[in-house]
């Protein structure tokens, strides 16, 4: 049967609104719908309603209960009656509510009589199911019409329209077929040309050619809206639902799915075919034929713009959506006997057609050596048998080598009119899939270039969807960040990122998303990203136990292009995971010295892991906090200079102690005061031992190729051996006993016109490293520094007569955090961000 076309009169002033079941789920929702309709200025408004949420399913359940002669039938019917009576009581004046409830009660008596008949014969014909299923729309629209009429805000009045009197359909192969001449004549009788009020129309239901009630099937109310849009020659159809519009991907699988601003009819149909939450192609057909724009909006966020589906969308988006079909099987027919043989494809797909097997996707190479196609997974076994029977002769003769059926597949489709004629779109798709480690089994693209479809393993479906979506919809410079150690340095870093994140997003498209925090005992994993303006509150309320593996998995999100773990702890346990994370492709930025100054074999392994995982490992702040010491050293080497020696004051604590220590106050008192001011570690011995300086020296030495271990560094500790044990408080109490030794060294230096400084030295030629207290002349660069400055002196082939000096604050949360932030931005520049 040919499908008659809808009428082709010029567009009128009518606007058709359709509200689904979730939009009229309860009294509050129905009031919201009334508010939306009353806010629509035009007087020519048609409102198509679905049944209240769950009612259609409940009515069909009554039929099933009657067929089973279940005792629950009466109670469930009463529950439906009571639900609608309660809605009327809440929404209408008492008199109107009573009238409405009486009609519902009368309908329920009719339903009960029909169900008794069904119970007697234990079977319900399709027309009985259609009759009962349609009551939900009758009840919801009668109620809504009464409500609108009582509120009296619509110009021209309110009229209830029973779609069974206006929409006449015939049974077709693909479902109900609208009989347009008959339907057009009916609407002309029911809605005079001079009527300018509001129509409240039942969705879902219609009348067949015999005059019997029928339904328009699933998505029937959307179809009703499209039909009435055509019958009324509407200038727009608005489909109200519970989402903000058509999304670029399923938000349950792609957290960063975006609302698409506009789609062409073809794009919407492609996306709908591949499972996206768009109105069904068949339901759009009347509107498409009439070129009536369809606007998808959210009932619960009416102010949002929604998605416009029209003939000529103005969207600048190249790709409109990425979606998947799961539970797919791939069948491959392969053999040299197929090459150049006419009719092979016809035999193959004819056999599948005769068996009632639907083919979703077809792919064939130009050599004609093989044809593969995708089908629903449930039909895989039958399809394999059908193809083997159809080509049994060729299989016996060896002309076809095999019929391979691969189950557990999925199809990923990338859809967009803007892909046509655009260079590099396919490359972008396959680059994203390759980077995500997704293997492509088959590829299909039509000549329209509107759709690229690939068959992949089902287990890779979500990962593939997220990766491709990120490639087209996110900034390529979106970074998933997990921070370990949100203490002094980590907290300062979060605050610094907060002050710059919007500027960076606007100026450079760099999208920094802090998604996880981890401390020694607990962690916080954010579904999207943390609100950095309130991260301390969120952290205080975090209750999940710290789990490094779960933390890393969360940071390495499939849907975000890049991942980085920032380790602001001083934990050797955390540092021991660096190689594992780098190998997994997670970038690392850290001021933690433990990894780079630990065993040389592990240090070398970090480099190899970073190469294997394609990740970056940055650690500027391990030496000199925010001072550009590591970067300066790299620049010297990478530009061909030869580093001969490095020496410096690498401890802000020890710089302070020996800047202040002038003999007027005992050394122990200066140490105690420094601890009170926060200049030392909680246990000052951690500073005075010189181990921290030795670690920094090792890091510098390894950066220029020296294979140093901590044991190779000759360290002079300022902690007397007698005070190595005990608590920090006990150490401070006993330290005055050793003041005389330190005073003697100061006096000797002063007598020679020198000062005392705690210096680390690296002799590259000799491969030696020393750390200790030395005497320096008054004019030495290290003799005249600010209280807590770090200072590093590079002697190189170029800088031999006047060595290169880097000097400045080398400690403190803010400057250390600044150094880490600089590394983070440097990482993003490595990854292509225009920093």
Image (cartoon, rainbow, N blue to C red):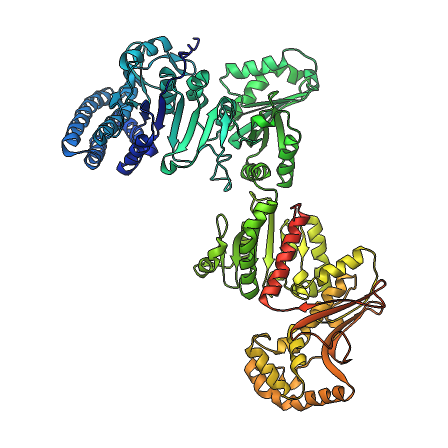
Tell me residue 116's x, y (percent): 20, 23
Q: Tell which of 196 and 372 is nearer to you.
A: 196
Tell me residue 347's x, y (percent): 59, 13
Q: Residue at x 63, y 62 (%)?
A: 591
Q: Residue at x 77, y 57 (%)?
A: 635
Q: Tell which of 783 and 282 is nearer to you.
A: 783
Is residue 519 something that shows in the picture?
A: yes
Q: Tell which of 44 and 166 is nearer to you.
A: 44
Task: Report the side of 735 relative to 650 (left or right).
Answer: left
Q: Which quadrant, please, contains the N terminus?
A: top left
Q: Residue at x 67, y 57 (%)?
A: 618
| Rendered view: 682 above or below 13 | below
Task: Report the side of 809 relative to 763 (left or right).
Answer: left
Q: Tell which of 3 and 150 is nearer to you.
A: 150
Is residue 715 something that shows in the picture?
A: no
Task: Report the side of 580 relative to 536 (left or right).
Answer: right
Tell me residue 765's x, y (percent): 85, 67
Q: Residue at x 21, y 37 (%)?
A: 90
Tell me residue 393's x, y (percent): 63, 14
């Amino acid at each position: 049967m040919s499908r008659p076309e809808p009428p082709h009169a010029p567009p009128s002033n009518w606007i058709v609104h359709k509200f689904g079941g979730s939009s009229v789920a309860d009294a509050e929702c129905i009031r919201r719908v009334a508010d939306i309709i009353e806010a629509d200025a035009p007087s020519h408004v048609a409102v198509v309603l679905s049944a209240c949420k769950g009612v259609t399913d409940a009515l069909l359940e009554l039929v099933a209960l009657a067929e089973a002669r279940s005792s629950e039938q009466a109670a469930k019917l009463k529950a439906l009656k009571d639900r609608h009576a309660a809605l009327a009581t809440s929404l209408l004046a008492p008199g109107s509510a009573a009238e409405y409830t009486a009609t519902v009660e009368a309908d329920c008596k009719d339903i009960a009589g029909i169900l008794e008949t069904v119970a007697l014969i234990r079977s319900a014909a399709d027309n009985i199911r259609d009759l009962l299923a349609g009551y939900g729309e009758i009840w919801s629209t009668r109620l809504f019409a009464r409500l609108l009429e009582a509120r009296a805000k619509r110009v021209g009045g309110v009229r209830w329209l029973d779609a069974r009197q206006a929409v006449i359909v015939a049974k077709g192969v693909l479902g109900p077929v609208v009989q347009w001449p008959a339907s057009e004549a009916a609407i002309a009788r029911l809605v005079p040309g001079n009527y300018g009020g509001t129509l409240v129309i039942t969705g879902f239901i219609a009348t067949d050619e015999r005059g019997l009630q029928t339904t328009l099937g699933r998505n029937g109310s959307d179809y009703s809206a499209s039909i009435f849009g055509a019958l009324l020659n509407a200038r727009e159809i608005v489909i109200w639902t519970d989402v903000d519009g058509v999304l670029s991907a399923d938000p349950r699988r792609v957290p960063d799915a975006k609302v698409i601003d506009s789609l062409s009819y073809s794009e919407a149909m492609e996306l709908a075919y591949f499972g996206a939450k768009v109105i069904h192609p068949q339901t759009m057909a009347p509107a498409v034929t009439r070129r009536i724009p369809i606007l998808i909006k959210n009932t619960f966020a009416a102010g949002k713009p929604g998605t416009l589906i029209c003939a000529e969308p103005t969207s600048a988006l190249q790709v409109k959506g990425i979606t998947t079909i799961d539970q797919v099987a791939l069948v491959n027919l392969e053999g040299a006997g197929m090459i150049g043989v006419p009719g092979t494809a016809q035999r193959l797909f004819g056999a599948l057609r005769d068996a009632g097997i639907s083919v979703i996707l077809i792919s064939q190479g130009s050599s004609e050596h093989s044809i593969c196609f995708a089908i629903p997974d449930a039909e895989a076994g039958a399809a394999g048998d059908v193809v083997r029977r159809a080509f049994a002769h060729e299989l016996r003769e060896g002309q076809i080598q095999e019929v391979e059926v691969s189950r557990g597949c999925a199809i990923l489709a990338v859809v967009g009119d803007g892909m046509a004629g655009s260079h590099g779109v396919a490359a972008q798709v396959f680059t994203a899939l390759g980077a995500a480690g997704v293997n492509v089994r088959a590829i299909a693209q039509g000549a329209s270039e509107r759709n690229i479809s690939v068959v992949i393993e089902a287990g890779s479906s979500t990962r593939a969807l997220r990766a491709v979506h990120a490639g087209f919809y996110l900034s390529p410079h979106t970074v998933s960040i997990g921070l370990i150690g949100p203490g002094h340095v980590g907290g300062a870093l979060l605050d610094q990122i907060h002050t710059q994140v919007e500027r960076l997003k606007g100026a450079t498209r760099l999208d920094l998303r802090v998604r996880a925090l981890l401390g020694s005992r607990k962690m916080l994993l954010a579904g999207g990203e943390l609100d950095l303006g309130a991260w301390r509150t969120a952290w205080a309320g975090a209750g999940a136990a710290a789990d490094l593996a779960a933390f890393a998995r969360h940071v390495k999100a499939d849907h975000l292009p890049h991942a980085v773990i920032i380790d602001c702890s001083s934990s050797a346990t955390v540092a021991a995971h660096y190689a594992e994370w780098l190998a997994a492709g997670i970038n690392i930025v850290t001021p933690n010295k433990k990894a780079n100054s630990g065993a040389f074999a592990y240090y070398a392994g970090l480099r190899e892991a970073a190469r294997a995982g394609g990740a970056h490992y940055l650690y500027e702040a391990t030496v000199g906090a925010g001072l550009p010491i590591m970067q300066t050293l790299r620049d010297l080497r990478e530009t061909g200079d030869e580093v001969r020696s490095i020496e410096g004051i690498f401890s802000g604590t020890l710089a302070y102690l020996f800047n202040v220590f002038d003999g007027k106050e005992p050394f122990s008192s200066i140490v105690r005061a420094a601890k009170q001011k926060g200049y030392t570690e909680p246990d000052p011995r951690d500073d005075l031992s010189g181990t921290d300086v030795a670690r920094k020296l090792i890091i510098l030495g390894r950066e220029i190729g020296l294979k140093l271990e901590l044991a190779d560094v000759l360290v002079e500790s300022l902690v007397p051996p007698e005070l190595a044990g005990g608590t920090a408080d006990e150490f401070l109490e006993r330290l005055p006993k050793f003041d005389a030794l330190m005073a003697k060294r100061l006096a000797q230096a002063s007598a020679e016109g020198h000062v005392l400084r705690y210096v680390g030295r690296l002799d590259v030629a000799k491969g030696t490293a020393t750390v200790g207290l030395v005497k320096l002349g008054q004019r030495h660069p290290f003799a005249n520094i600010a209280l807590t400055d770090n200072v590093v002196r590079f002697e190189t082939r170029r800088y031999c007569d006047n060595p290169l000096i880097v000097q400045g604050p080398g400690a403190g949360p803010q400057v250390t955090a600044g150094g880490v932030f600089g590394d983070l931005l440097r990482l993003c520049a490595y990854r292509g961000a225009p920093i």
